[in-house]
Amino acid sequence: MFLDIGSAILFGEGADTVRDLYEDKEIQPMLTIVASDINDPGNKKTMYVDIYRQSGRPLPFPVVEIAMMMDRPEHFITPIQDYLKSGAGVILRSANAGPDLYYDKVQVQKHLRAAIRAFYDRPLIYLFNKYILYKPRKRNNFLVVGEIDDQVGTNHRKPTWETIDWSKRTFEEAIRLNEQHLTYTQDNL
């Protein structure tokens, strides 16, 4: 289960990150991929989900409405309850979106705690801003297992990723793993 929080469903072709995953023939069959956006009742221009639904241009993956302030477990579970498979792990992504851009420190803490409570019985990966967070099943906190190159993955000033030759970029350039949370067994050597 992959939920992109704040997918920019009205930008470009709609939900670019979700679209990239959905169109990847190796990834798509392995994940239930869901885009999301908000409906801001205080501003007709930011009623993104309603505008999307009224547009008549459906995206090839589900689009769900999320709360502007996702600080309770139900804010995570309710929008995707129809897509959750029993016991399956969850991947969340919030990069260049509401929680990682607009929440203050206290709101971010409430948001992350709510995600942990929502998926306490499931393994959870959360790509939050430049951090790769992991919570094993029945754990009550995240491990920071890596960082994404913030000049590419979360660069809010310009679309740096458009000028990169992805056929030459290596995993090590894109991700810095937190070695303290990696373990090796004899089978890995």
Image (tube, rainbow, N blue to C red):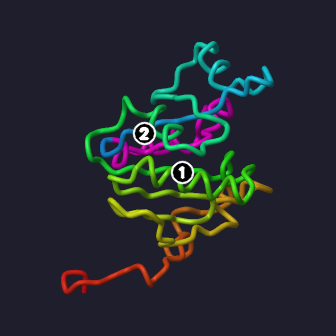
Q: Which residues are magenta?
A: 1-28
Query: Dot 2 corresponds to which residue?
Result: 33
Query: Contact, CB < 8 Å: mark 1 with mark 2?
Result: no
**Residue at screen point 19% across, 81% down:** 187
Q: Is residue 2 left or right of residue 56?
A: left
Residue 10 falls inside the magenta stretch = yes
**Quarter of the image with the C terminus in it:** bottom left
How many angstroms separate mark 1 from mark 2 (CA)? 11 Å
Query: Dot 1 corresponds to which residue?
Result: 93
Where residue 4 appears, as percent x and y from the top left, is 53, 43
Q: Nearer the viewer, residue 22 or 64?
A: 64
Where residue 79 appears, as percent x and y from the top left, is 48, 32
Quarter of the rendering containing residue 161: bottom right
Q: Amino acid at mark 1?
A: Arg
On residue 166, the disc is none
Q: Is residue 26 left or right of residue 162?
A: left
Residue 143 falls inside the magenta stretch = no
Q: Nearer the viewer, residue 106 or 176?
A: 106
Can you say whether 113 is above or below 65 in the image? below
